[in-house]
């Protein structure tokens, strides 16, 4: 079962590309979903976030206050690193447990691991192949501001906090240019999918 890491810059359209692979038959493990699970009420990850960043990041109902936490970490690279250091061991544990379940069910399946920080956390070392999704920086800012309901200036800050996309593409085995039409992106995804099926043989 090939384990394929898929990453991209902030608001590059990574989720759309992941959905295309799912339509073609891939199983998908979404690290964003795992990240939400590890900070659910009662989870060890949430307790560690509270200990690290204070009670102000916890809402009255006991859930994580994402806006309060975001205001802290998206303006400070060091604090963002600290948050990642807390969360990623928990995310990694769930990721490998889930991939083992999929492997046991069908060893021939292709599993896409959708991970924004694939290279930054060295998760890429556990992948058989890696894919990077790219688009123009102006598109990232526009899409990110609209999606996350933030100002273009804040969207630019989030772009700047991530590993440069040029570095991600240099580390990847495949690159999907998502700056054009959906049809153009789909054609690239299908070409990569055909290549990945050969990896799985």
Image (cartoon, rainbow, N blue to C red):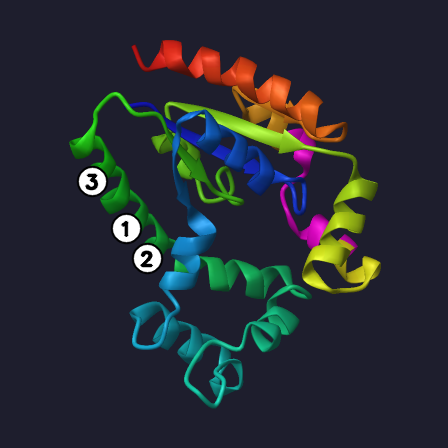
The N terminus, quarter of image: top left
Q: Which residue is mark 1?
A: 93
* Numbered disc 2: secondary structure: helix
Q: Nearer the viewer, mark 2 or mark 3?
A: 3
Decide if residue 76 is on the left or right side of residue 52: right
- The answer to whether marks 1 and 2 mark residues whose Cβ atoms lie closer than 8 Å is yes
Question: Main SS of the magenta segment?
Answer: helix
Q: What residue lies at 50% left-to-right and 37% top-to-bottom?
A: 119
Q: Quadrant of the C terminus?
A: top left
- Counting residues from the start of the chain, the first of labels 2 and 3 encountered is 2
Residue 153 lies, with reference to residue 11, above or below; the image says below
For marks 1 and 3, give the CA distance.
13 Å
Disc nearer the start of the sequence (1/3): 1
Quadrant of the image occupied by residue 146: bottom right
Residue 97 percent location from the top left of the image: 23, 46
Q: Residue furthest bottom?
A: 60
Residue identifier under label 2 = 90
Magenta stretch: give its range. Answer: 156-167
Residue 165 is inside the magenta segment? yes
**Does the residue at mark 2 contact the one at mark 3 (Cβ under 8 Å)?**
no
User: Callout 2: few (<14), some (14-19), or many (20+) C-alpha neighbours within 10 Å?
Assistant: some
Residue picked out by circle 3: 101
């Amino acid at each position: 079962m090939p384990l394929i890491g898929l990453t991209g810059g902030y608001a590059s359209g990574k989720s759309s590309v992941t959905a295309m692979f799912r339509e073609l038959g891939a199983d998908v493990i979404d690290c964003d979903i795992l990240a939400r699970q590890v900070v659910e009420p009662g989870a060890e990850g949430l307790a560690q976030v509270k200990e690290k960043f204070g009670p102000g990041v916890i809402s009255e109902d006991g859930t994580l206050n994402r806006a309060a936490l975001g205001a802290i970490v998206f303006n400070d690279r060091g604090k963002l690193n600290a948050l990642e250091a807390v969360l990623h061991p928990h995310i990694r544990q769930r990721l490998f447990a889930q991939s083992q379940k999929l492997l046991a069910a069908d060893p021939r399946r292709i599993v896409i691991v959708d991970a924004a920080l694939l290279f930054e956390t060295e998760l890429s070392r556990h992948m058989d192949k890696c894919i990077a999704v790219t688009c123009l920086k102006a598109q990232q800012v526009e899409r990110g501001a609209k999606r996350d309901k933030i100002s273009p200036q804040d969207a630019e800050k989030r772009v700047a906090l991530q590993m440069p996309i040029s570095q991600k593409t240099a580390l990847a085995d495949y690159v999907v240019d998502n700056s054009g039409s959906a049809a153009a992106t789909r054609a690239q995804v299908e070409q990569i999918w055909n290549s990945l099926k050969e990896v799985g043989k």
